[in-house]
Amino acid sequence: MKKSAAPGQTSEHLPLISNRFVYTATALIAVLAALSVVINLGGRRLGAELALAGHSDSTQAFLITIGQDQLRLTANTIRFEAQRRDGPAERADLYLLWPEMSGYRGELRARFDDVTQPDGLIFVQLSQSTMSRDMSGRVEPIYSHLFEGPPENGPHGLTLHSLKSDAGYGNEVLLTAQRPGESDFAVRCILPPEGTPASSGDCQRDIHVGRDLSVLYRFSSALLSDWSAIDTAVRTYVTSHLDHSAASSSAFTKIADEPARNDSL
């Protein structure tokens, strides 16, 4: 049945658009406008985050406790966002430009992202020591029993030791060098075949720093000519970022049931 006009109001005087429709349309426009602002701001923020792609150019320092050692590390040297915080941590992963030994900066983004230039970064992993000896200290008691064949002349004054195929090290070799007044240098590498480019982390070595800190660092075999300078630079960098201002004997001592150290690697 056709709806009749209200008393005293003819059909030709009824409004074409009801007040309810006007209110609804106005509210919808306001919501769309607000959503547009949110998307615009959010898009800019997301765009900036995507542009950084996990990097941070912040130089904010974090006080990080690993085992018995405390370190002050800046955000732009820490690889992973989840590790950029104060407090205790199982480990911290860093990346540093070589030879500057500095962190990420926007104008140097290409050196962090360009996989065709693997020799521009040093990767460092900091964790509590689980072995009583570092890699140099493991050469005689452990690695020497895994050598296969006589030593050979390696690159850049290093001596190359092939490892037994069943030793569990794949295609790695051990490179060593004597150092007057110091323990022998030792590094494990997967050397690329001739004519094949090196990767960004095909050499690795670990050292002990601080009270109980294991420093595992990786670098490209293309940088083996700098092996001595890299070893000194990494040790100096980590040592210089140790923080001794807070007493750790009470709050950060090892727990009594800490697992025994493992010297099998």
Image (cartoon, rainbow, N blue to C red):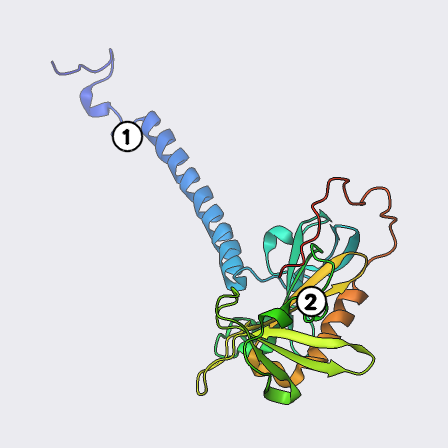
Write the residue at 66% across / 83% down. Answer: 226
**Type of amino acid at the residue the image marks with label 2:** Pro
Please give left or right for residue 4 compared with residue 41 in the image: left
Q: Is residue 100 visible?
A: no
Q: Which mark is residue 117?
A: none
Q: Which residue is mark 1?
A: 17
- Determine which quarter of the picture holds residue 129: bottom right
Please give left or right for residue 171 compared with residue 230 in the image: left
Report the mark closest to the observer, 1 or 2. 2
Percent x, y of residue 202: 54, 73
Q: Secondary structure at mark 1?
A: loop
Write the residue at 69% across / 54% down. Answer: 130
Mark 2, other Cα within 10 Å: few <14 / some 14–19 / many ≥20: few
Nearest the eye: 87 or 8: 87
Q: Quadrant of the N terminus?
A: top left
Q: Is residue 243 visible?
A: yes
Write the residue at 52% across / 75% down. Answer: 190
**Type of amino acid at the residue the image marks with label 1:** Ile
Write the residue at 19% across / 25% down. Answer: 12
- Determine which quarter of the picture holds residue 97: bottom right
Q: Secondary structure at mark 2?
A: loop
Q: Which residue is mark 2?
A: 141
Percent x, y of residue 102: 69, 71
Percent x, y of residue 169: 52, 67
Labels in figure, total: 2
**Looking at the image, is mark 1 or mark 2 earlier in the sequence?**
1
